[in-house]
Structures are given as structure tokens and as C-alpha cells.
Amino acid sequence: MRDAARPAEHPRNARSGSCSAGCARAACAVVLVAAAGLACGKKGPPLPPLVRLPAPPANIVAQRRGDTVDVSFTVPDTNTDRTRPANVERIDVYAITAPPTISDEQLLKRATKIGSVAVKSPKDPNAVVDEDERDEEVEPAVGTGLDQGATAHVEESLTRQAFAPADLGKPDREARRADAEAGRPLIGPLPSAPARTYVAVGVSTRGRKGPLSKRVTAPLIDPPPTPRDVHMVYTEKAVDLSWSPAAAPTSGPNAVLPSRPLGSAAPTIAYNVYDVSTDTPQKINKDPLDEPTLADPRMEWGEKRCYAIRAVAIVAGASVESSPTPAVCETLTDTFAPAPPKGLRSVPGEKTISLIWDPNGESDLGGYLVFRATSGGPLEQVTPKPIRETTFSDSVEPGVRYTYALKAIDRAGNPSAFSDRVDETARE
């Protein structure tokens, strides 16, 4: 009876319950489909290919000599992500005469490309190894350019146009911001010696530029006069060079290069010495020399050695060299005899006389010669050729008084003076 009297379920509630169950089933189906899609590894949109760019050229130096600037740098052998080999096809070098606050973007836009250096590049830019992997794993670069990691040089001959400030057009926004942050007026940089700025940048095999190298400058001031009166002498230990000091830089109506402006820092004068014995000059001194002298300890007998001197004007941390002096040359010839042996002592024996002495310290010592005189007669050489030992035993007649002396001789055949003499008589 209760069951018959039970009121029927409201149709609306019945539909509502049916819908809730259906929605739940649909949601489950969506989740399952999504999970199935993830399990199957469905691909998303394609990613752009990885573009490797060469690291910036390192160790860049700008050295001005007369009216020429030599820019040297190390060719990169890694990419910006430190993989090897570098995806580099060439190195471009740019120069600009502009304020130091110029941005990289403005510099590349307004600078002059003064040269390019071709570089060996990888066959496949994506065939790289990480920095901690062995060199044997690196695919060799190919081509006719310089090896990656080599030192490259680009020269610029300074013209009148190089001394004129570059036309930057509208003020560089980044330069204005840098001036404002530094508290400087926006009318331009503070007065200083004019300079030309150089940078190098690697270019990938697809023509994309990597990061710029650090900036280096060459001063645009008069080069100093060339030194005069170079003298070269040498001893066993060093080649000694001396020259007349160069005067301070001068300017006038006949000056080849513009004079430094009023208010700029005055340059100091120093000197660089170059070994010009080969086609590639080699600077001998690490830092510029304050005094007009240098001792070169690199001694190699029989070698022809040539030197040239350049004065160098240093201003605001940059330098400009003069033209070189005419080369002075000498063939290093060993004409220097060793010191006479010291400490010669004699010990008599039965029909023998033994000699002992202190060793010489010359690095090119060839040996010793033993001389003997009988009963006050002249000294005569006993050893037919130099001996290396510092002892000698001589078989002689007993009861006869003998006199001994030594000479040291070097490998070039230069004999020393006689040592002190000793007299001795052998026993029966």
C-alpha cells in the first residue's frame, strides 16, 4: 500500500538526473581522449631551427704605426653556446671616429667596414660538441681561410676622412641615456684626445652576425718623431741596444696628420724595440720602455740579428708609434774566451803526477787543455784535444821537476788565458 501510495518522481527531476550522468560520462570521455593523445606523443607546432652564432673575436688589439692601424684578434673557435666548432665563415672589422658612448647598433650602422678575414667553417653547423668533450670529437672545419683559433690581422691606412667625426644623424637614444645616467650634459662627450674605434664581429655561414668583440681605440694624434742613432753591441750574455731619445710630438702647417686639439691630454713618449730579422717583426719588450736602452738576452751564436726602434706616444691609454728606424744588423759571433781555470793543484805519485782543478761555469765550455814544461822550458800541450774532466794523470820521469798550467776552451774554439802554474816532481 505504501508503495502504491508513493508519489511518482517528478519528470523534471528525472531529466536532471539523466543529464548529470550523461555529462559525467562525456567529461570522462574527454579526459580519456586527452590522455590517449598525450600517450601517443602528438606533435605540437614545429619549432624554428636552432641558429648557432660565433662567439665574439677575442684578444683584439689596435696598434697604430705612423698612418697605419693594425687590428689583430683571435678567430673564435666556439659558438655563443660554447659548442665547437664555431659556425663562422668570416670576420668583419669595422672602424668609426665617434664618441665612446655610441651604441653597438649605431656603430654597425654608421661605421666603415675596413676589411674581412675568411675563416675555415664547418661542413655542418649543427654537427657540434660541447665544451667539455674531447677535441677528437670535433669535426674539422674546411675551406681556404684561417684556422679557427688563429690570430688574424686587418690593416687600415688612415686618410683625411678617417680623422673626421662620423655623421651620426639624430642623437643616439642609448648614448643620450648613458650621458644622462652619468650626469653629463647632452651636448657631447667631455674633451679628450680624438680616437678611432675598432670592433670585430664573426659572421655565420648563413650571413648572421654574432656578438661584437670588445672595442679598442687608436689615437688620432701626431705620431712622434722616429728615434735616431741606434747602436748595437753584444756580449756573451745579451745584445745591448741604445739610441737617441725622440723629441715630443710637434705639429705645424706641413704636418701629415692633424694635431691634437687644445684641452686634450698631452702624450708621453716611450719606445718599442722590434726584432726585424725575419719578414714578421717581433716586439722584444712587453711594455713600452721609458729609457732609450734595451738588453736582449736571446743569444744564439751564428744567428743574424736585426733590430728597429719605434717611438710611441701614449695618451688616454692608447698609443701611436713612429716610423721605424733603419734596421741595424749583426751576425752574433762567439769571440769571447772562457775564464782561465782556477784552483789547479798537483799530487805526486810513483812515476806519475796527478792534477785536479775547479770546473769552469761557462755554458758553452768545450773542455780543458793541459800544458807541461820540463826544467824551466816552454809550456807544451800534453792533451791532443780538450778533455771534459777536471782531473788529469801524467806519466813522467821520477825526480824531474815539471811545471803545469791549463787553458779552458769553448765550443767555438776560443781558448782562455793560462791558469796559475804549479810545480811538481814524481816519486821513484
Image (spheres, rainbow, N blue to C red):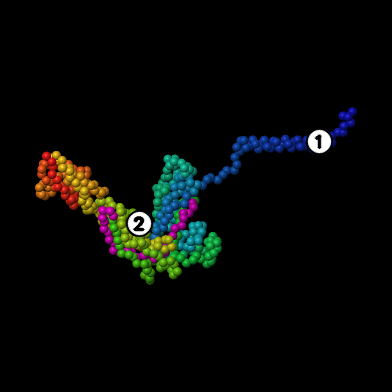
Q: Please name whichever residue, 289 or 254, is drawn nearer the observer in this view of the structure.
A: 289
Would you identify the image quadrant in which residue 38 lies? top right
Q: Position of residue 343 (x, y in %)?
A: 21, 48
Residue depth check, mark 2 versus mark 1: number of the one nearer the observer: 2
Instruction: Identify which residue is drawn at 39% across, 64% down.
Output: 268
The magenta stretch is 209-238
Instruction: Give the class, few, some or many, for how many residues have Cα within 10 Å of label 2's Cα (few <14, many ≥20).
Output: some
Q: Secondary structure at mark 2?
A: loop
Instruction: Give the class, few, some or many, for how many residues have Cα within 10 Å of label 1's Cα (few <14, many ≥20).
Output: few
Label number found at residue 14: 1
Q: Please name whichever residue, 245 or 153, is drawn nearer the observer in this view of the structure.
A: 245
Instruction: Identify which residue is drawn at 47% across, 62% down.
Output: 98
Q: Position of residue 154 (x, y in %)?
A: 40, 55
**Quadrant of the image containing the C terminus:** top left
Q: Are marks 2 and 1 in contact (CB under 8 Å)?
A: no
Q: Position of residue 170 (x, y in %)?
A: 53, 64
Name the residue carrying label 2.
285
Res 422 visible: yes
Question: What amino acid does circle 2 point to?
Answer: Asn
Per the image, is 76 magenta? Answer: no
Question: What amino acid does circle 1 point to?
Answer: Ala
Instruction: Identify which residue is drawn at 43% across, 54% down.
Output: 60
Q: Please name whichever residue, 268 or 195, is drawn nearer the observer in this view of the structure.
A: 268
Q: Position of residue 305 (x, y in %)?
A: 28, 55
Per the image, is 218 magenta? Answer: yes
Label number found at residue 188: none
